[in-house]
Amino acid sequence: MTAHAQELRQIAQKMVATGKGILAADESSGTIKKRFDSINTESSEQNRRDYREFLFRTTHAMKNHISGVILFDETLRQKAADGTSLCQVICDTGAIPGIKVDTGAKDLADSPGEKITEGLDGLRERFAEYHELGARFAKWRAVINIGPGIPTQHCLNANAHALARYAALAQEAGIVPIVEPEVIMDGDHDIDRCFDVTSAALKALFNALEEQNVMLEGVILKPNMVLSGSTCAVQASDEEIAEKTIQCFKENVPSAIPGIVFLSGGQSDKQATSRLNAMNKIADLPWKLSFSYGRALQAAPLKAWCGKVENVNSAQSAFAHRARMNGLAACGNWESSMETSS
Ligand code: 5MM
C-alpha cells in the first residue's frame, strides 16, 4: 500500500467533485500544431502560452465546472504574461494541475495496426520533478484500434501492463494516475464490437492494476464511451450508447474507483455533452461519471479565437459555455434547449 494513501484519495475525490470535470489541455507539440493550423495560427511558444492562459483565466467557468487541467510538459513550466506560473493560475481558480507523462503511442512490434504507449524510462525521476512543479495528478493514454483481427489480447495486455506500471509509480510519488485505455472510434464496426473490445481492455487493465498493487481509491479512469464505429452504417442513439456504456462499466469497473471521466474522442461537442447527460440520468451508479474532454471543450473556443487578441473574450465565452453544459451533464441536468444560449 502506498505511503500516500490518504492524500491520493482526497485528490481523486476532488477531481470528480459534483458538477465538475477535467479540461484535457495536454496536446503534444504535433497535436497543438494541427489544432492551430485549423485556425491559421502559428504554433509558436507564445501563441500556445497565450491560448492556454486565456482558457485558465476564464475564471467563473474554471471555478465552477473544472476540477483539474491536464498539461503538457511545456505548459507546466510556462509563465503567464504577468510572470505568474500557469500552474499557479490554475491553482488560483481552485482547480488541480495535472501532467501528461506518456511519450506517445508507437507501433507495437510485429503487430500491424496496433500501438503501445511509451514513456516508462526515467518516470520515477520525472514524477519527483513534476510533483515539485505542482502536478498532483497525471495521465497516460493507451491507444486500442479496432479492425480485422485486432486488437489482439497481446496488445491489450502489453498496454495494460504499461498503464499499471505508470500508475504504481505515480502513486509512489503522491500523484493520482488517470488511466486512459482509449478504444478508438474509427472504423465501420458496430456498437456491440466496441462493447466487447472495451470490456476486454478494461478486464486487462484492472487485472494489471491489481497485480501491481495499485490502490484503486486513488485512480481515475478515463475511457471511451461505447459507440458505433465512426463509419458504421447504423449509428446508435444517445440512449443506447448510455445504456451500453453503463452496462460495460458496471461489468468491468470495480466500485472502489472514485470516478470515471470520459474522453470525447472525436464526437461533436453536443454529442459528448448529451451522451454524458444520458448516462448520468441512469440511477444507482457506484462511481462519479464526468468528463475529461479535449476537443469537446476546446473546439468552440479555438474557432472563436482564431489567434486574434480581439477575439479572446468571445473565445472565453465559448469555453465557459461548454464547461457549463458539461458540468450540468455530469449531474444529468443538461437540456438540449440550453445550447441556444451562451
Ligand atoms: C488533448 O489531447 C490529448 C493529447 O493528445 P496527444 O498526446 O495526441 O497530443 C489526449 O490524450 C486527450 O487527453 C484525450 O484523448 C481526450 O481528448 P479528446 O479530444 O478525445 O476529448
Image: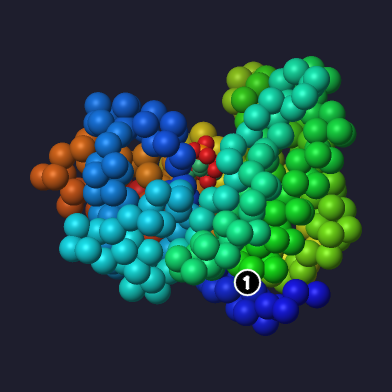
Q: Where is residue 230 in the image (x, y as percent from the top left)?
A: 60, 25
- Horizontal placement of 339 versus 99: left or right? left
- Horizontal placement of 237 versus 33: left or right? right
Q: Residue at x 25, y 42 (%)?
A: 47
Q: Where is residue 83 in the image (x, y as percent from the top left)?
A: 22, 63
**Coloring scheme used:** rainbow
Residue at the limit of the structure toward the left, as seen here: 310
Residue at the limit of the structure toward the bottom, as seen here: 6
What residue sits right under mark 1 in the picture?
Answer: 174
Q: Residue at x 70, y 61 (%)?
A: 169
Q: Which residue is drawn at 72% across and 71% down?
A: 217
Give neighbour class at mark 1: few <14, some 14-19, many 20+ (Cα, 10 Å). many
- Which amino acid type corresponds to the residue marked 1 in the rendered image? Gly
Answer whether residue 335 is visible to the viewer in this image: no
Can you tell me whether the CB of the residue at mark 1 lies under 8 Å from the nearest atom of ligand 1? no
Residue 228 sits above or below residue 20 on the image: above
- Horizontal placement of 170 versus 212: left or right? left
- Horizontal placement of 230 versus 79: left or right? right
Q: Where is residue 237 in the image (x, y as percent from the top left)?
A: 61, 37
- Image quarter of residue 57: bottom left
Answer whether residue 87 is visible to the viewer in this image: yes
Q: How many labels does the image show?
A: 1
Judged from the image, the secondary structure of the residue bearing numbered disc 1 is loop
Residue 320 sits above or below residue 118 on the image: below
Residue 125 sits above or below residue 149 on the image: below
Q: Residue at x 80, y 75 (%)?
A: 1
Front in this rendered view, residue 191 or 25: 25
Front in this rendered view, residue 267 or 63: 63
